[in-house]
Image (cartoon, rainbow, N blue to C red):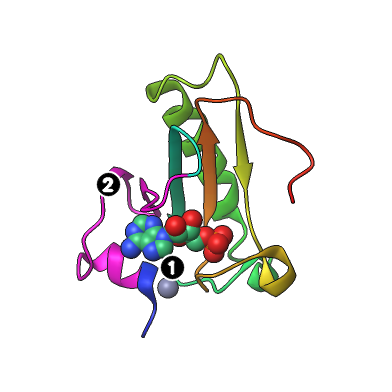
Amino acid sequence: MDCLFCKIIKGEIPSNKVYEDEKVYAFHDISPAAPVHVLIIPKDHIPSANALTEENAPVVGHIFHVVAKLANELGIAEGGYRVVNNCGEDGGQTVQHLHFHLLGGRSLNWPPG
Ligand code: AMP
Ligand code: ZN
């Protein structure tokens, strides 16, 4: 399948890995928007949040468990952070494989643009 993040999971495209287990892969964003900017993705190809179902949605809970662990390890748990999922064109999704941005290390603006 011609999917950038599936290729990253398979090691066909290099990435700066932060964490991996049997269900998820996490790596530094190539164009960081904050001092900490990690992407956490399911190993199964799920195109977007729109494709979540009763069957595949449990991985999202697991991803948030990984978020809590990584936030602690990366030193942003105490200061705070933001988890973002961009879905579809209006949401600004540019890679069609479900991913969650973990952003921290600076004060983040709200609302987003
Ligand atoms: P989104 O706009 O929510 O679809 O986010 C896609 C993210 O993937 C962006 O923040 C990009 O900077 C990031 N990205 C694109 N290509 C790569 C890559 N090869 N390695 C790491 N991050 C990437
Ligand atoms: Zn994929």
Q: Position of residue 101 (x, y in %)?
A: 53, 47
Q: Position of residue 2 (x, y in %)?
A: 36, 84
The answer to whether residue 42 shows anywhere in this view is no
Q: What element does badge 1 sit on?
A: loop
Q: Which residue is mark 1?
A: 44
Q: Quadrant of residue 14?
A: bottom left
Q: Is residue 16 left or right of residue 61?
A: left
Magenta residue check for 13: yes
Question: Mark 2 near ligand 1 (CB under 8 Å)?
Answer: no
How packed mark 2 is, by other alpha carbons closer than 10 Å (few <14, some 14-19, many 20 or more), is some
Q: Is residue 75 left or right of residue 113?
A: left
Q: Tell me the residue at 71%/34% (across/down).
A: 109
Q: Amino acid at mark 1?
A: Asp
Answer above or below: position of 20 versus 10: above
Disc number placed over residue 17 in the picture, else none: 2
Q: Position of residue 6 (x, y in %)?
A: 35, 71
Q: Is residue 109 left or right of residue 102?
A: right
Residue at the top extreme, as displayed: 78
Disc number placed over residue 82 in the picture, else none: none
Magenta residue check for 62: no
Q: Amino acid at mark 2?
A: Lys
Q: Are marks 1 and 2 in contact (CB under 8 Å)?
A: no
Q: Position of residue 4 (x, y in %)?
A: 37, 73
Question: First in sequence: mark 1 or mark 2?
Answer: 2
How packed mark 1 is, by other alpha carbons closer than 10 Å (few <14, some 14-19, many 20 or more), is some
Q: Tell me the residue at 68%/72% (across/down).
A: 88
Q: Which residues are magenta?
A: 6-32
Q: Quadrant of residue 83?
A: top right
Q: Tell me the residue at 45%/49% (across/down).
A: 39
Answer above or below: position of 65 versus 28: above
